[in-house]
Image: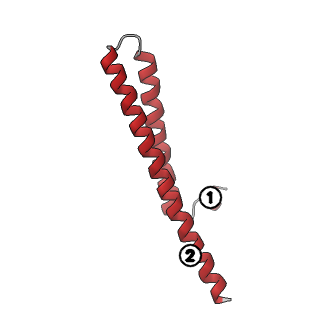
Amino acid sequence: MIKKFINKDNLGQRFMQLVILLAHLVLLQWILYTLYEGGVLPFKALLLHFLGISVYGAVLIRTCAWIYKRQYLKEMGKSADTKLDH
């Protein structure tokens, strides 16, 4: 089953998905840390943590959207090329 999921043609895409997954897990860990320590952190530090989380999340969303849009356009270009060949 894993051989069908990962092959030479999509190795780069699967690696990028792994990087995105790890980035999301880092964000989740940061959120959990901030919520867990929220009661003992000074208000300014807590506010900066939430500001950082929101910026990190926004950048992560925009980056993922850009990556998948680029991949979609690349696949559409390949699809258009194969239709022209037939």
Position of 14 relative to 46 (above/below): below
| Image location of residue 40, percent across then percent down | 36, 10
Quarter of the image where the N terminus is located: bottom right
Which residue is drawn at the image coordinates 43% and 36% (left, top)?
26
SS class of the residue under badge 2?
helix
Which tag, 1 or 2, sits closer to the chain's start?
1
Q: Nearer the viewer, residue 44 or 78?
A: 44
Q: Nearer the viewer, mark 1 or mark 2?
A: 2
Residue 9 visible in the current orientation: no
Q: Say which residue appears at 62% left-offset and 55% top-offset.
A: 2
Disc sitting over residue 5 in the figure: 1
Residue in the foreground of this view, choosing between 8 and 71: 71
Labels 1 & 2 near each other (Cβ < 8 A): no
Identify the residue at horizontal 58%, vertical 60% (top origin): 6
Q: Indicate the position of residue 19 as horizontal and vertical percent values.
A: 45, 49
Q: Which mark is residue 77?
A: 2
Q: 33 left or right of 73?
A: left
The single residue placed furthest to the bottom in the displayed view is: 86
Q: Position of residue 69 (x, y in %)?
A: 53, 60
Binning the other alpha carbons within 10 Å of mark 1 as few (below 14), some (14 to 19) or many (20 upward) gives: few
Where is the C terminus found, in terms of image quarters?
bottom right
Q: Residue 41, relative to residue 31: is it above or below?
A: above
- Give the amino acid at mark 1: Phe
